[in-house]
Image (cartoon, rainbow, N blue to C red):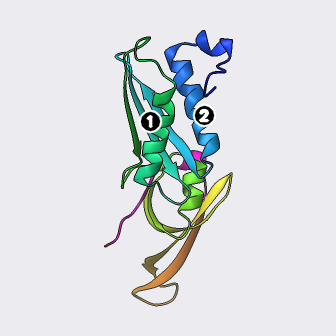
Amino acid sequence: MRGLNVPSFYKNMTFKEKVNTLLAECLLEKPSIFLIDLVITDAFKVIVTVDGDNGVALQDCIDVSRFIDNDLDREEQDYSLEVASVGVGSPLKLVRQYKKNVGRTLIVKTGTEIIEAELVEANDDFVVLSWEAREPKKVGKGKETVQKELKLPYEDIKEAIVTVTF
């Protein structure tokens, strides 16, 4: 689509379709960067949120912004464009985000509990969380520290946030 050889179907696309197509093309050229969210408001404010397997540099956001901006015509449709990386404390939305955060501590909300645990595994179907808990001793009085592990399917996760430690 870039350059002078713009396919005729591109000219018949809606503004939203053009943005989606350009964004998909851009991310093909930057395989370590992936889309988290795309919002196009009724006032044509385009908000793109991206993440990356190795984080997102400012230059990545600039590159995505320029790629989209270079092939949209403000004479045809006036718009504003904002490209940003996911913020610290933003909930994980994609399996790819879980995979990149293996080894980090998450706060995970399920339907019934909140667990702060290390993400020890993430595959396409579930995550494995590990944490220490204080439980009553099996024999005698008092409590002991035990290692807990939970295999949790993604559909059971209501929200998961990476904790930031300083």
Instruction: Using residue 108 as the reference point, say whether residue 121 is left or right of it.
Output: right
Q: Is residue 122 visible?
A: yes
x%, y% of residue 45? 36, 24
Query: Where is residue 107 drawn, in percent x and y?
Result: 42, 60
- Alpha-carbon distance for marks 2 and 1? 12 Å
Region of the chain picked out in magenta, as a range = 152-165
Residue at numbered disc 1: 48
Say which quadrant the N terminus sits in: top right
Which numbered circle lies on residue 81? none
Q: Residues within 10 Å of mark 1 (few under 14, many from 20)?
A: many
Closer to the camera in the image, 54 or 11:
11
Q: Please, what secondary structure does the residue beneath circle 1 have? A: strand
**Which residue is at the far left?**
166
**In this orientation, which residue lies closer to the viewer: 97 or 121?**
97
Do the CB atoms of the residues marked 2 and 1 lie less than 8 Å apart? Answer: no
Q: Is the residue 26 above or below the residue 137 in the image?
A: above
- Residue 39: % across, % down: 43, 28
Question: Most extreme residue toward the front, as rendered?
Answer: 4
- On screen, residue 20 above or below 97: above
Q: Is residue 111 visible?
A: no
From the viewer's perspective, is residue 127 above or below residue 103? above
Judge from the rendering whether residue 108 lies leftward or rightward of residue 9; answer left or right.
Answer: left
For the point 39% across and 63% down, the residue is: 163
